[in-house]
Structures are given as C-alpha cells and as structure tokens.
Amino acid sequence: MSTLLVDIGNTRVKWAVLRGARVSRVRAVAHGGRPAGLGALVHKAPREITAVMAVCVAGMKFERALRAAVRTRFGVRVSFLRSTRSAAGVRNGYRDVWRLGADRWSAVIAAHALGRLRPVLVANIGTALTLDAVEFLRRLMLHVPPRGFHRLRHFGFLANRVRQEKLAQCRTLLGHATPPRVRDEAANREAPEVPALPSLARPPLPSRVDARRAGATERRR
C-alpha cells in the first residue's frame, strides 16, 4: 500500500510517497499561483498509489485541481487534512481553529508524535515565520501559583508569631545585642499621649442679611 502525500503551500508544492512506514525523498516545485501544474505532478507519481492525503493552504482552486487529477489518474478520493480543536493528543489553542493553518497543524501533530510526549517547538519558515509550542505553555503554567496563593512562608525563628523574640535571642547568643525582649513588655508599655485634634466643626454660615450688608459695603469701597 502506497500513499501519496501532498503539501500545497502559498508558493510551492511538496510531495512524497509513503510505503508502509518509510517515506521517500521529499520533492518540491514552485506553482506560481497556477494549479494546472498539479496534473503533471500526479501523472509522475507511481502507479501503485492507493491513497492520497493532502494539505492545502493555497485556496479551493488548488484543491479542485488536485481532486480532478487524482480521480483521473488513480480513481480515488483525496483526503484533505483540516485544522480541528484537537487531534492525536494535541489541542489547538486558537480561539478560531482555522487560524492555525492545516500545514502547521499537521506539523505540530507530527512533532508531538516524534517527540514522544516531550515539549517541542515547531518552527515553520516559509512565506512567514511561525513558531508553535507543543506542551510548553501547559507545562509552564503548572509552575505559576494561583491568585491569592502565599508564595513565601517562613518557619522556625522566622515565623511571624515569634520572629521578633527569636531574632533577638539569636543576636544575644551571637553576642551582638542585649538580652531578648519579652513580648509582654511591649504590651505593658504606656501608650504615648496623642495630642488633641482641632475641632472639625464648620463655622456658622452668614445669613442672607449679613451677606447683603457685606456686598453693599464692598460696593461702597
């Protein structure tokens, strides 16, 4: 059983033949935006082709041309790979799954299978440079604590309850300070006197008569 693998990109067509578990040498040719050349490509393929799998990002006219050429040459249907939400253990992280092109989607699935569940970075260098991370972001987020989580806790002599007393005791044992203070001493201290705050009461507002008199006085001046 032989399968013809076809990748129709924006500028080139790549193809190879899969026989069992072995893939032939990959060949490529520029299509120049004209799908007519796909007929010649299919005509040069081996006669024992029993299935055709393709990825196309160049538009529907290339898909129609490939279907017609394969039907004429081999009498089989072309299976086009489409971007989906998940496949073969890989999840598409795009909100709109179609934004991840089918060529990149197939490369990510293949990298995931070849990487054997290890994090993989797939670099596609074509008409545009794209980087797709497989399992990297998920594993990275495992090390990000949830919101509100106490990321730093102190134990022993740095615990919040006994920090002041224990640190003072450590300094005493090291000969750098006076004996430790007892917490009760701080509690028994007299609270410092707080000066009285000035009155916050608002002064009385002038009446209408006083306001008229003040205005008349101001005009006379």
Image: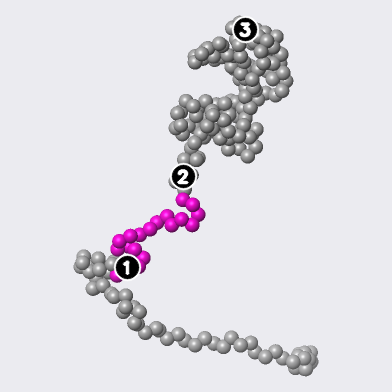
What number is the disc on residue 44? 3
**Is 2 displayed left or right of 211 in the figure?**
left
Name the magenta segment's main secondary structure: loop
Residue stretch rendered in magenta on the structure: 145-165
Position above or below: 3 against 112: above
- Mark 1 or mark 3: name the one nearer the start of the chain: 3
Q: CA distance from mark 2 to mark 1?
A: 33 Å
What number is the disc on residue 142? 2
| Quarter of the N terminus within the rendering | top right
**Residue 206 placement (x, y as % from top left):** 72, 91
Does dot 3 land on a helix, a strand or a loop? Answer: helix
Q: Contact (CB < 8 A) between labels 2 and 1?
A: no
**Residue 47 placement (x, y as % from top left):** 61, 5
Can you see residue 40?
no
Displayed quadrant of residue 214: bottom right
Can you see residue 141?
yes
- Mark 2 or mark 1: name the one nearer the start of the chain: 2
